[in-house]
Amino acid sequence: MKKLNLLALLLFIAGAVSVFTLNTPTTRAIQQRVMAILAPFIHSSAAVQDAVSAGGPSLDPRQVQKDNEELRIQLQNLKIIAQKYNQLIEENNSLRKLLDYKQSYPFKISAARVVKRSSTTWWNTLIIDKGSLDGIGTDSPVITDIGLVGKTGKLAPHMAEVILLTDESCRVSAKVEGTLEQGILSGERGGLEVRPNLRLKFLSRDAAVNIGSNVYSSGEGGVFPAGILLGQLKRFENRDITGEGIVEPAVDFSSIEHVFVVEMEIQVDKQAPTPAPPAANAPRPAAAADDVVPKAEPVIIKQP
Amino acid sequence: MLFNLLVLIATICTFAVQEFIPPIEIANMATLFLPAVFFMCASVAVPFMMMLVLAFVTGIIWDARYLPPAMMDVVQQPETLSLMGGVGGDSNLMGGNLAFGISVMLFGLLGAFMQGVRPLFKRGRLELPVLMVGAVTFIWLMAQYLLITFMRGSFNFQQGVWSKMVTDTLLSMLVAPLIFLVLHWMAKLSSYEIKYEGLRYNFDGR
């Protein structure tokens, strides 16, 4: 080997090693910058894809009118429900005050449009049209009206990548409805089909679970809030020491058009120690509670 | 020198073009990975030093665009954890992804394989280089999958994995001759001599 080539090889190895040793914030910054540079192309490709798919059979005007009327009725119903909802919130708040009940932390929901499904080697991701400048952070839960979609990954100013629930690296602490069974839900490796099954691992062996039960997030992790629907239990298998459930995802990932990004509003007094879960009958000091417990606010929904 | 620069620019441009290439749903979202295939084709057309530069640039951009972001350390987000119910849980369960920079090493290694058929390519033979592009694409995907398997545990090969890898490989072999043509055109444009004409025998009919 020529001396110059040997030198180039050594430099290459040194460069590669230095890249390996970059810390997480630096690699995230690099990823965000590259996403930001490629964002116009991603948007353009989605526009091209839309244009191609719009070139198919044209919509029937009668059907559109009928859909429109149905949507108007639905809107009126939802307005009535929203009024009732606000009344309930007010009533709930006044009852909370009476009980001095510690309110769960409020969260903000931002609506986003799905731009496209990414084509990668081994990862299940899609792109949405809201990013860091729209107030979205990395690792925020992404949901639809049906259930959990995944969590945000890389961000651009007005674009974000969502790691889907069907990806093996997106793991959610989950519980089976109607039981005390809890486990970890994740996708299957290489499960790149449109709607692959999920695996609920680390259940008890011979767990008494009903097939068809809903599986919800348990909220015991640091990313996903509790009570989000993940899917339905299809099958239960006993492994060597644990049980494993096969779960059909609630969301059809091939037909998602709009999603909601959940942003937890963190309001913690930095001076105060980490709040421990209160004992059932332990009295709570009112002043400290005011510092930590935020005022009740309805869920904020930003329209896309 | 101008040829090397053109190849470098073209390699970077392929990342923009990649966004326009749709996946094939029936083949488990298989697609043509243009930046990777372009790099493999370019590896036989450029000298060893330039191949390493291309491997570094392609690897960095590939990981930046396609690798999921690494999880922050738990100590960097204590508020979130305390709010959401204590230690453990989702944020601690996200490990097992490839490290940023892994593609640099993989592309470097695979580019070195491709350099092995450079003498043939210089003689104007494209059959073996095209086959090598397919083989190297397959090795690249397999290496990624095996690394993920090694990091996450449990050896698991579904049928969909094979169909995806085979489709990706076939697509790369299909496009490789076109990329070689583009590389020849770029060489002509920059007066770079890819072909080694010294050993060619010309029969003039006498």
Image (cartoon, coloured by chain):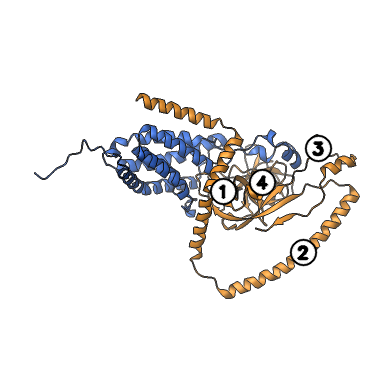
Chain colours: A orange, B blue
Badge 1 and badge 3 both on one subunit: yes
Amino acid, disc 3: Pro
Q: Is residue A13 above or below residue A102?
A: above
Amino acid, disc 4: Ser
Amino acid, disc 2: Ile
Mark-to-mark CA distance, 2 and 1: 34 Å
Disc 2 is attached to a residue of which chain? A
**Mark closest to the chain's N terminus, 2 or 3:** 2
**Residue pushed farthest bottom?**
A62
Q: Could you tell me which secondary element the residue under label 1 belongs to?
A: strand
* Residue B22 falls left or right of residue B130: right
Q: Which mark is residue A275?
A: 3
Residue under the image location 50 percent in, 62 percent down: A51
Residue A304 on image: x %, y %: 65, 58
Residue under the image location 70 percent in, 53 percent down: A109
Q: Residue A154 carries which label?
A: none
Mark-to-mark CA distance, 3 and 4: 22 Å
Residues A23 and A245: in front is: A23
Crowding near pointer 4: few (<14 within 10 Å), some, many (20+)? some
Q: In which quarter of the image is residue A299?
A: bottom right
Crowding near pointer 1: few (<14 within 10 Å), some, many (20+)? many
